[in-house]
Image: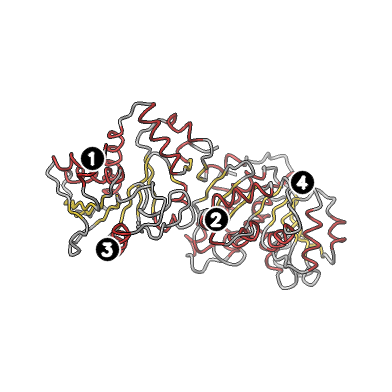
């Protein structure tokens, strides 16, 4: 359902597209480099129109070659360009060497690192390392990156910030912090998750005119970058002659004493996402009060698992885990849900209890969605949180494979993965959503979409996207610092309207 230009690739896959463009479609490598140089100048001119003094830091490969082409084109446009290289440019090979030669022919000079640190620049362009880095940055490159990061001017990265892993979004010891990145040929998945957003800043993509057929061999295993169009593709406008029974009945299971807010947040989000009916199955201690401010929610007091089992014969979509706790009552309710064939979303303490249950043996089922944050994902995988964060895509795919589930690995650049190894990344969302109850809202959104007939994969993708877009809308109106989970729910109707639903 995604446009080819919204595919996400590993660095190896992008190299495959480059190879196909050059060796199979006959586009000269230097022609692609010149197109990249022009794109760099165009983006820099549009984003930083008052910058007349540019510093371009060039490295030893084709990323540096892009920098030399950009330097030549910018100088021809009247920009005062300073080029600094971390290697002797006479050692360059192939297209990068030609780019350097053309810069020389135009009269351009190259300063060797370390550059005069008294220089004043309006814009610094990073063309040091590109996507090929696979080890910790060290030596002069580490020093150059540190120096670039402390310059008192905007930084723009060419293809990817130097030092950032193109596959994982993690800095390899250090990385350039750019406020603009112009990237080429294929979108690198690491730029959209983990630390990628913080290091890349605003991302501009340019395919350099490479035909789509060059990406055919790299398409297998590629991911998707979720966009707002996906909502309209998944969900259709309702027929006028309809009734609430056609849009699912969500049963939210959770809310141990003292945690009534979680089930209410989840239930309200489900209602605001089109669920026909929503019932909260929750602790008797607050069952009579939990829906006082939202009478559209139905409530059932659950004294024990037998009471829950007595109602699970109905055609419910389950949302298990918000405020569930980890008491015997909690564990019994989760086990009762797991013993049914119901479609469900499992979140929060439902995941923590599931991780404990996994210690007793492998567990796998179909028709469910798991929505862990990194710490919960680490428990499900029996590993450390930093291991999850060092390869978020890989972690999400592995959880999906082990549990047979569609998985949402929450965080910056949330990952949605399915058991077949397909994945998508959502670049929407903001730090204001890092607040208590935000995950409960997401669970409610996904459960509502499941109840309306979406597959687990589509419901997870659409739910993550709608939730993130609602968070961005709420932040635009209220700011990030004061954002609370209920604000996300309140913004959901406008997201559905924007999708023409």
Image quarter where the C terminus lies is top right
Earlier sequence position, callout 4 versus callout 2: 4
**Residue reaching furthest to the left:** 107
Q: Nearer the viewer, mark 1 or mark 3?
A: 1
In the picture, measured across the screen, residue 337 lies left or right of residue 165, that is: right
Of circles 4 and 3, which is in front? 3
Residue matched to label 2:
470
- Residue beneath label 4, please? 245
Quadrant of the rendered image containing residue 333: bottom right
Image mark for residue 151: 3
Residue 318, position as x, y percentages in the image? 74, 53
Residue 251 appears left or right of 418: right
In the rendering, which numbered label is found on residue 97? 1
Q: Whole-percent x and y of residue 491?
A: 56, 57
- Earlier-in-chain disc, 4 versus 3: 3
Q: Secondary structure at mark 3?
A: loop
* Residue occupying the point 48% across, 31% down: 216
Q: Mark 3 or mark 2, which is nearer the start of the sequence?
A: 3
Rendering coords of residue 62 (x, y %): 30, 42
Q: CA distance from mark 1 to mark 2?
A: 48 Å
In the rendered image of this protein, does residue 353 appear above or below residue 169?
Answer: below
Q: Nearer the viewer, mark 1 or mark 4?
A: 1
């Amino acid at each position: 359902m995604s446009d080819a230009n919204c595919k996400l690739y590993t660095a190896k896959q992008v190299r495959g597209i480059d190879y196909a463009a050059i060796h199979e479609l006959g586009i000269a490598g230097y022609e692609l480099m010149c197109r990249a140089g022009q794109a760099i100048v165009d983006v820099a001119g549009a984003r930083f129109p008052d910058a007349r003094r540019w510093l371009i830091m060039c490295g030893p490969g084709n990323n540096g070659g892009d920098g030399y082409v950009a330097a030549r084109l910018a100088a021809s446009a009247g920009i005062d360009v300073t080029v600094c290289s971390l290697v002797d440019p006479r050692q360059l090979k192939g297209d990068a060497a030609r780019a350097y030669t053309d810069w020389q022919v135009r009269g351009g000079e190259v300063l060797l690192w370390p550059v005069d640190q008294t220089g004043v620049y309006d814009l610094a362009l990073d063309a040091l390392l590109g996507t090929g880095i696979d080890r910790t940055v060290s030596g002069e490159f580490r020093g150059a990156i540190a120096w670039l990061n402390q310059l008192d001017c905007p930084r723009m990265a060419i293809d990817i910030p130097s030092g950032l892993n193109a596959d994982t979004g993690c800095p390899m010891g250090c990385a350039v912090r750019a406020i603009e990145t112009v990237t080429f040929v294929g979108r690198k998945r690491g730029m959209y998750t983990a630390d990628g957003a913080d290091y890349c800043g605003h991302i501009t993509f340019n395919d350099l005119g490479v035909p789509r057929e060059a990406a055919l061999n790299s398409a297998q295993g590629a991911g998707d970058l979720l966009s707002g169009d996906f909502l309209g593709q998944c969900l259709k406008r309702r027929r006028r002659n309809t009734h609430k029974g056609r849009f699912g009945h969500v049963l939210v299971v959770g809310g141990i004493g003292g945690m009534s807010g979680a089930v209410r947040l989840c239930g309200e989000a489900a209602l605001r996402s089109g669920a026909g009916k929503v019932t909260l199955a929750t602790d008797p201690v607050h069952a009579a009060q939990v829906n006082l401010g939202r009478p559209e929610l139905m409530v059932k007091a659950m004294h024990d698992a037998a009471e829950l089992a007595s109602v699970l014969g109905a055609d419910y979509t389950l949302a298990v885990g918000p405020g569930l706790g980890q008491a015997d009552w909690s564990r019994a309710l989760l086990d009762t849900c797991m013993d049914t064939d119901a479609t469900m979303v499992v979140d929060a303490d439902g995941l923590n209890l599931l991780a404990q249950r996994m210690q007793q043996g492998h567990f796998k089922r179909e028709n469910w969605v798991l929505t862990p944050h990194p710490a919960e994902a680490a428990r499900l995988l029996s590993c450390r949180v930093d291991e999850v964060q060092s390869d978020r895509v890989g972690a999400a795919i592995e959880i999906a494979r082990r549990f047979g589930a569609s998985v949402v690995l929450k965080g910056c650049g949330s990952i949605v993965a399915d058991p077949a190894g397909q994945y998508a990344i959502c670049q929407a969302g903001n730090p204001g959503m890092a607040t208590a109850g935000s995950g409960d809202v997401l669970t409610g959104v996904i459960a509502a979409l499941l109840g309306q007939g979406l597959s687990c994969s589509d419901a997870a993708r659409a739910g993550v996207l709608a939730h993130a877009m609602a968070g961005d809308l709420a932040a635009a109106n209220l700011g990030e610092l004061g954002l609370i989970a209920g604000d996300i729910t309140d913004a959901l109707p406008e997201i559905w309207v924007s999708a023409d639903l």
